[in-house]
Amino acid sequence: MEPKEFDIEFPRGDTPPLKFNLLDKNKQLIELKEQDELYFTVKKSYGTSEVVFQKRYSTGDIQKANDGYKVFIQHIDTANLNYGTYVFDISIKSGDYVATLAIGTLTLTNEVTHISNE
C-alpha cells in the first residue's frame, strides 16, 4: 500500500487542526489497540535522522476523533522554527508491523504576532 500524500501549510506558531483517517481495505476506520503506536514525525528533509518534532498516540498528542484521528500541534512546536518547508510522515507500529500511512510537506508561512509578542 502506497502512503497517501498531502501537504499542510499554516503560519508559524499557529495551532492548526490536522485530522486524518486510518481506513482498512474495506474503508472502515481502523481502531488502534492499546499496544499500537501512531507517529506524526516532522523533519527538515528526507533521509535525515534529526526529528524537528514528533507527536505520538501514546502521549495523547494524537487522539481518536469522530471521523478519524486528530494531531495536536501546539504553537510552541513551530514558534521558533525557520519559515519554510519541512517533511512529515504518519506511521503506525503494531507489534512487528510498521507502515507509513501518509507522507507530505509542512510549510510554515509568515506570521505577524511572534511568540515574543504574546
Image (tube, helix red, strand yellow):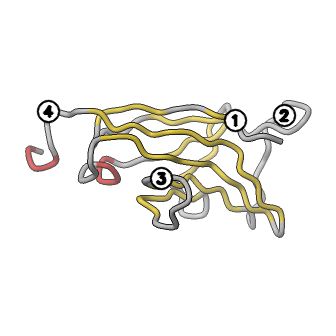
* Quadrant, the N terminus: top right
The residue singled out by tag 2 in the image is 28
Q: Residue at x 56, y 51 (%)?
A: 62
The residue singled out by tag 1 in the image is 4
Front of the two marks 3 and 1: 3
- Gap between marks 3 and 1 measured at Cα: 18 Å
Q: Dot 1, crowdedness within 10 Å: few (<14), some or many (≥20)?
A: few
Secondary structure category for the residue under label 3: loop
Q: Residue at x 54, y 63 (%)?
A: 59
Secondary structure category for the residue under label 2: loop
Residue 49: image x %, image y %?
A: 52, 67
The residue singled out by tag 3 in the image is 45
Q: Nearer the viewer, residue 62 or 112?
A: 112
Is residue 66 positioned above or below 89 on the image?
above
- Gap between marks 4 and 3 measured at Cα: 26 Å
Front of the two marks 4 and 3: 3
Tell me which numbered mark, 4 or 3, is placed earlier along the sequence. 3
